[in-house]
Amino acid sequence: MPERKLSIPNAASKSTGSQSVSLTRRRTRENLKEKIARARAIASRLCQAYPELQVPLDYGTTFQLLVAVILSAQCTDAAVNKVTPELCRRFPTPDRMAKAPLAEIERMIRTLGLFRSKARSLKACARQLVDRFNGEVPGTMEELTTLAGVGRKTANVILGHAFNLPGLIVDTHCARVSRRLGLTRSEDPVQIERDLSKLLPAEQWTGFSHRMIIHGRRICHARKPDCKACIVEQFCPSSNLIAHRSNSRTQTHNGQDQG
Ligand code: SF4
């Protein structure tokens, strides 16, 4: 399989005058204009921190990218990259994947979580591509999300990277960081997409959401965010709260020890 890496352009490199939009901690509400300015400052900072992202999913064709993204659900990219070379060499096209024995696909991806349901999705998705899209991966959200194993997150990756169309990729990391940063209050990925789309220009959506994912993986961890190392700490309404919670836990713990 000829190898390509997803590459994300440096979209948010313009100066945003970040000093003027840093969060005023005493302020309890900000208006939309202020939130937009803060979101753009965050995008700019993330762009500086993660300038030319290489999302490490290997693929040769748009179909192979689709295969890799379907396989990446609840798996590391590294684990996916271990199985895709052989899988895509054996079944490089929708037609070949659709005709592949299910047990053979399962065997080749058995090191990945949920491998049985992923194998079924790959085979069904390939069949749908052959039957309904002439063996081509379609280029709209509406069409992509009719395919087996393809939700909005996967569709946005395909639109952003195979078709160069803007897409906000809202996974668990992007959702968590967006809420902590006060860019959304929702738990629903579709609503989070809507909220973020109002704050940033469309050409920044793909890069911004990828950077939020990276930031969530590296710094803004689910259990213990590293706020001291965070490049957007000055724009984040959660940093004080998290620090306060962690101090309270430490004090309680010390108190119990002393007792
Ligand atoms: S300041 Fe802390 S909670 Fe806020 S985005 Fe950074 S790491 Fe996450």
Image (cartoon, rainbow, N blue to C red):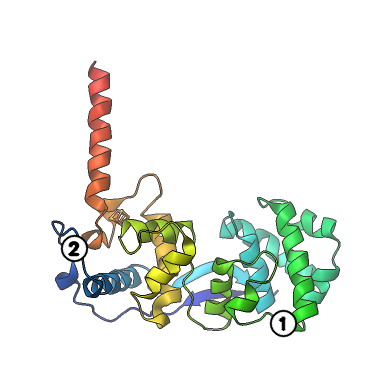
Q: Position of residue 111 (x, y in %)?
A: 69, 51
Q: Residue at x 18, y 76 (%)?
A: 17
Residue at the farthest top position = 259
Give the quadrant of the C terminus: top left
Q: Secondary structure at mark 2?
A: loop
Name the residue at 43% across, 59% down.
Answer: 175
Q: Amino acid at mark 1?
A: Glu
Residue 69 relative to residue 203: left or right: right
Numbered disc 1: secondary structure: loop
Determine whether, in the image, residue 39 is placed left or right of residue 90. left
Ligand 1 quadrant? bottom left
Return the residue nearer the eye: 183 or 245. 183
Label 1 CB less than 8 angstroms from ligand 1 = no
Mark yes or no: residue 2 visible.
no
Q: Is 143 drawn above or below residue 213 in the view shown?
A: below
Task: Looking at the picture, tell me which residue is in the foreground, 212 or 26.
Answer: 26
Give the mark, 2 or 1, whose residue is nearer the N terminus. 2
Image coordinates of residue 64 in percent, x first then y, are: 68, 73
Q: For the residue with label 2, is its CB less than 8 Å from the closest atom of ligand 1? A: no
**Callout 2 amino acid:** Leu
Q: Position of residue 104 (x, y in %)?
A: 83, 58
Image quarter in which the N terminus is found: bottom right
In the rendered structure, find residue 157 and report the number of the disc placed on it.
none
Which residue shows up at 23% across the image and 35% down it? 248
Determine which quarter of the picture holds residue 24.
bottom left
**Residue designated by label 1:** 136
Which dot marks residue 23? 2
Residue 152 falls left or right of residue 51: right
